[in-house]
């Protein structure tokens, strides 16, 4: 599980790969050729980035005839959100709630 | 085959049989999905998706059944059950890869805005399914 998340963070730690995910979010099911057209990267570079994204399970592919269609798979991003964001958001919200009670308590007193 | 709009994939430390049960058992689906999937899972049968004891939100037909590997169902908003233009299709593919299962959920033929939003809930559903099968626990509010 930790290894899986390492792959996700490493895959996301590159602006070019994040742009590819944005492109797949905007237009699901693109071929390598279509993805390359919208990027300032060579076809080979896009292909290598897609391999990293696929290894992290951030991109899934579907074969349709001779075409390989690429899809953003948001499931690992959801896992990151649940593990790393929701966890830290909770204490902050709790602290704000405690502050609110304290300030309102002061008004009363 | 129409080009899918959404393809979601998750790896779960489990068996194909357990994943199949988790997708098709009304009581188990309610645990991690909040809503229950209810059907006898025979080709041509109806299936419903909704909060236990309430009217279903999603209804459809069982189109393909190959336990524990493949399940295909049609999806319609319950209020548009007879409108073919509002019908989409969900395919579940379950592959055992050693001690892991790869579950792929493909949602195709989506036209309805409401169903698009349901479809975007898949990451939360699949994450919670994984947590449930791997730990026996669930996130109380997976869509929060």
Image (tube, grey):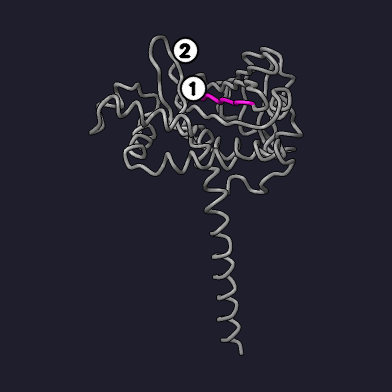
Q: Position of residue A94 (x, y in %)?
A: 59, 67
Q: Are marks 2 and 1 in contact (CB under 8 Å)?
A: yes
B104 within the magenta span? yes
Q: Is residue B30 above or below residue B88?
A: below
Measured from the top left, where is residue B73 in percent x and y? Answer: 60, 20
Q: Position of residue B63 (x, y in %)?
A: 62, 14
Q: Residues within 10 Å of mark 2 (few under 14, many from 20)?
A: few
Q: Does residue A66 belong to the magenta stretch?
A: no
Work out whether residue A96 or residue B18 is closer to the camera in this orientation and state it.
B18
Q: Chain of mark 2?
A: B
Q: Chain of mark 1?
A: B
Magenta segment: B101-109
Please, what secondary structure does the residue beneath circle 1 have?
A: strand
- Same chain for mark 2 and mark 1? The answer is yes
For label 1, the residue is B108
Seen as rendered, the residue at the extreme right is B27
Label at residue B1: 2
Residue B106 position, x and y percent, is 52, 24
Query: Quick check: B73 left or right of A14?
Result: right
Q: Quadrant of residue A12?
A: top left
Which label was assigned to residue A20?
Answer: none
User: Which residue is rendered at x = 46% and y = 44% of the image?
Assistant: A9
- The residue lying at 63 percent from left, 13 percent from top is B64
């Amino acid at each position: 599980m930790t290894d899986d998340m390492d792959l996700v963070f490493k895959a996301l730690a590159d602006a070019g790969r994040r742009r590819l995910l944005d492109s797949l979010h905007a237009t699901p099911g693109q071929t390598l050729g279509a993805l390359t057209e919208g990027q300032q990267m060579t076809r080979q570079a896009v292909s290598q980035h897609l391999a990293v994204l696929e290894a992290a399970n951030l991109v899934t592919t579907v074969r349709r005839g001779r075409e390989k269609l690429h899809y953003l798979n948001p499931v690992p991003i959801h896992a990151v959100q649940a593990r790393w964001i929701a966890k830290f958001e909770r204490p902050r919200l709790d602290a704000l709630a405690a502050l609110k009670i304290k300030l309102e308590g002061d008004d009363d007193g | 085959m129409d080009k899918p709009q959404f393809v979601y994939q998750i790896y779960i430390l489990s068996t194909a049989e357990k994943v199949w049960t988790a997708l098709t058992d009304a009581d188990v689906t309610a645990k991690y999905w909040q809503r229950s999937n209810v059907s006898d899972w025979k080709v041509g049968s109806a299936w419903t998706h909704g909060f236990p004891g309430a009217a279903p939100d999603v209804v459809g037909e069982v189109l393909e059944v190959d336990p524990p590997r493949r399940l295909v169902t049609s999806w319609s908003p319950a209020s548009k059950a007879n409108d073919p233009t509002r019908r989409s299709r969900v395919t579940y593919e379950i592959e055992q890869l050693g001690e892991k299962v790869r579950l792929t959920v493909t949602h195709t033929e989506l036209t309805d805005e409401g169903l698009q939003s349901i479809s975007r809930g898949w990451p939360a559903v699949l994450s919670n399914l994984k947590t449930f099968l791997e730990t026996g626990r669930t996130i109380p509010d997976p869509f929060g």
